[in-house]
Image (cartoon, rainbow, N blue to C red):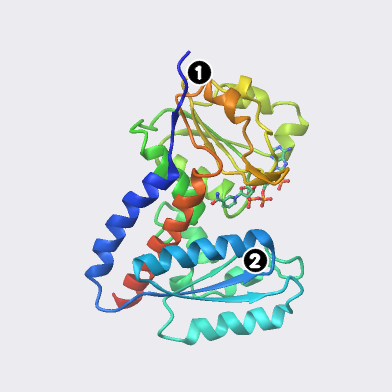
Amino acid sequence: MTQAQLLDGRTLADRIKRQLSTQLAGLSARPQLRVLYFETPTSMTYWAAQRKVAQELGIGIEGVMRSTDVAPDEVNQLIQQWNTDPSVHGMFVHQPLPKQLDAQRLSALIDPRKDIEGIHPQNSARRFFAKARIGSCTALAVMELIESTGVALEGKEAVVVGHSEIVGRPVSMLLLDKLATTTICHVGTDKAGRLEDHVRRADVLVVAVGRPHFIRGEWIKPGAIVIDVGINVVNGRVVGDVEFEAARQRAAFISPVPGGVGPVTVMMVMKNTVEAYKLQKA
Ligand code: NAP
């Protein structure tokens, strides 16, 4: 059996970057992005990646780092300040949030036109009606990787493992928009012992759980497209949620971790910043 084709997120991100550069050259001013990140290794690494790409593209970026015990009022004030500052076009708050911050309240506080992650209720509702202008960066990255295979999704069995508000649910909506027959699996599916059954019939499998090598390679349907969103550190090494080597022997396309969804997600943050800028200038 031949090995799956790797979905190289870095190459895809470079391609999107070139398109974005052309768009940016046509704008009358530089879009400005503000990022709230936290003093954790993951958040600091993600911030460094966002800053690097924004600077390469010429998008104005400023980050504010807070410790994980930041007071909710301080975060609220920061968001209000960015909401009312006309020179700020987009804001991005890193997740997972420290536990004292309420994700729903925070999402509702962000000006929906500046909401780069598409988490404001208005933006979530637009996604529900397939009318999103700015969507979840990770979900958009997953779709870019799937679309790069050239495989049409209509009528395909798509299985999403994980139903979080920033990954699993928005990805499921986008797959549905493409007329894939979409199944969402979660902790209840696993408890019922049904996860393997669902994964085995997936033409397109998207996994966003956050458990290393959680999806067994032998479960992958031969010829499937496998998108691994998970980021886990095991013995100092970053690994995904799928047993990569075994899955690679069965899938037709597979995204590696690292170097798959991650770099494309960072580029989607930039793309959404440009979209937010245009929305505010329209
Ligand atoms: P999350 O909010 O923790 O959600 C994890 C999801 O997995 C939940 O819906 C959870 O369901 C489900 N789950 C937990 N245990 C399960 C089980 N045994 N069987 C089936 N489903 C189970 O995480 P997230 O923000 O969606 O992120 C998921 C992973 O993707 C993490 O590793 C994260 O670091 C990574 N990530 C990567 C990128 C990127 O750009 N590469 C971006 C975002 C996230 P319940 O809520 O029902 O427990």
Quick one: 126 or 2, which is closer to the camera?
2
Label of residue 104 in the image: 2
Give the left or right position of residue 234, taking residue 224 as reference.
Answer: right
Q: Residues within 10 Å of mark 1 (few under 14, many from 20)?
A: some
SS category of the residue bearing label 1: loop
Q: Position of residue 194 (x, y in %)?
A: 70, 26
Q: Residue at x 44, y 44 (%)?
A: 9
Q: Position of residue 158 (x, y in %)?
A: 50, 32
Q: Residue at x 47, y 57 (%)?
A: 266
Q: Amino acid at mark 2?
A: Gln
Quick one: 238 or 95, which is closer to the camera?
238
| Residue for badge 1 | 222
With respect to residue 78, does 106 lie above or below? above
Q: Is residue 175 visible?
A: yes
Quick one: 103 or 213, which is closer to the camera?
213
SS category of the residue bearing label 2: helix
Q: Position of residue 121 (x, y in %)?
A: 54, 65
Q: Position of residue 65 (x, y in %)?
A: 63, 75
Q: Residue at x 70, y 33 (%)?
A: 189
With respect to residue 267, does 27 lie above or below? below
Q: Amino acid at mark 1?
A: Pro
Give the left or right position of residue 116, taking residue 71 as reference.
Answer: left
1 or 2: mark nearer the eye? 1
Quick one: 252 or 207, which is closer to the camera?
252
Q: Is residue 117 visible?
A: no
Q: How many marks?
A: 2
Q: Residue at x 55, y 65 (%)?
A: 47
The residue lying furthest to the front in this view is: 236
Between the residue at mark 1 and the residue at mark 2, the CA separation in whole angstroms equals 39 Å
- Mark 1: C-beta under 8 Å from nearest atom of ligand 1: no
